[in-house]
Amino acid sequence: MVEHEVSGKPVVLIIDDATSNLAVMSQLLEGEYKVKVAVDGEKGLKIARSGQPPDLILLDILMPGMDGYEVCRRLKADPVSRHIPVLFLTSQGELEDERRGFEAGAVDYIAKPARPLILAARVRTHLALKAAADFLRDKNAFLEQEVTRRTQEVTAIQDVTIMVMASLAETRDNETGNHIIRTQYYVRLLANHLRDNPRFSDYLSERNITMLFKSAPLHDIGKVGIPDSILKKPGKLTSEEFEIMKDHARLGRDAIAHAEQVLGIDVEFLLTAKEIAYGHQEKWDGSGYPLGLAGDAIPISARLMALADVYDALISRRVYKEPMSHEEAMRIIRVGRGQHFDPDMVDAFMVLEGEFRVIAERYVDNDADLARKAKQFE
């Protein structure tokens, strides 16, 4: 193999077992290009797959061992070399030979003896086409990277915004920040289990489950609009106070809708957040609020959130109550099957109850959180 080191020029690889052909082709091209040569297919493939692959390959067909068709097929099967244009330069001039060459992946087929001006023109043309194709691939790769980067950035902004909004509600409520995290994971756990259930499969796509996970922390955002005298009351609410407390569902939905209006566009995860904020206090038998919806009229997102929220409220310590055991919370949810909760969701919960307990233990409230909350009630 002979290499002519001429920097800044396109690289042309000639693969031919006849040294006389290599010499003639090299002499013809070396003034304008950096020329590399190989006397068989194996050596040619090695050069093509090297750290500095050629820009174009002139390839003979009739060679000992591996013929040109096989060399071309291997070049096109390898991601490293598939974009290198291959021009067959051969004495095989029959129409069937040419057809096989193009089927193998060649961009051109030149019969020997080649006229120097024609060969030079075709090499120049295919190098120009490759340069344009390389430019487009590089540009597309850059654009894909930029889209990925910006998508990740937007996603991060969404996540931070959700957590800031949810934390704002949490600072005024008697629940801890870990309640937000636990309910996120409860909802996703239930949704993933139910996605094969015919009742939910159309809705519970991977994308919608991601939206549920993102939106769940906003379920109680409306509590920022409830007076402290009611929100932080350690005892039982009066009927009048409870009517005011119930309004947090509407306040939450309206706050999220206002955020959409400010943005001027519909945001997918905020649509789910509105459903959850407005509907997670509805009950399967129609005895919930704010609309008294029943059964499948309650959005799936809100039904999932209802079960997750109640379970966590039952097992969590509050400044005004001690936590229930996991077993007692299970009993209450089982009793609520078909009354408070969607029956299929309760059945899923019973299957998953061990994993619910794991989530609760993983994100258990710490003493500092509870002490901070207690001070709000002094």
Image (cartoon, helix red, strand yellow):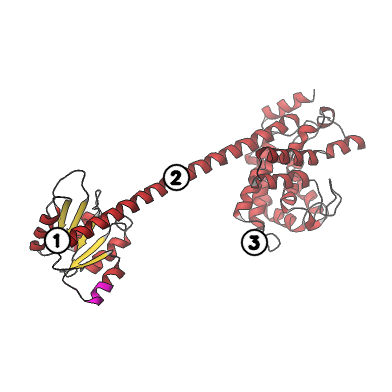
What residue is at 30 percent from the left and 51 percent from the top?
A: 131
Q: Which numbered mark, 1 or 2, is in the foreground of this view?
A: 1
Q: Choose the circle earlier in sequence order: 1 or 2.
A: 1
Task: Write down the residue under mark 1.
Answer: 116
**For residue 17, which quarter of the picture?**
bottom left
Q: Secondary structure at mark 2?
A: helix
What residue is at 80 percent from the left and 38 percent from the top?
A: 248
Q: Residues within 10 Å of mark 3 (few under 14, many from 20)?
A: few
Extreme residue in the right direction: 239
Q: Nearer the viewer, residue 354 or 128?
A: 128
Residue 196's disc number: 3
Q: Choose the circle earlier in sequence order: 3 or 1.
A: 1
**For residue 166, which quarter of the picture?**
top right
Residue 225 position, x and y percent, is: 79, 32
Residue 253 position, x and y percent, is: 75, 42
Residue 116 position, x and y percent, is: 14, 61
Asked whether residue 90 is drawn in magenta, I would say: no
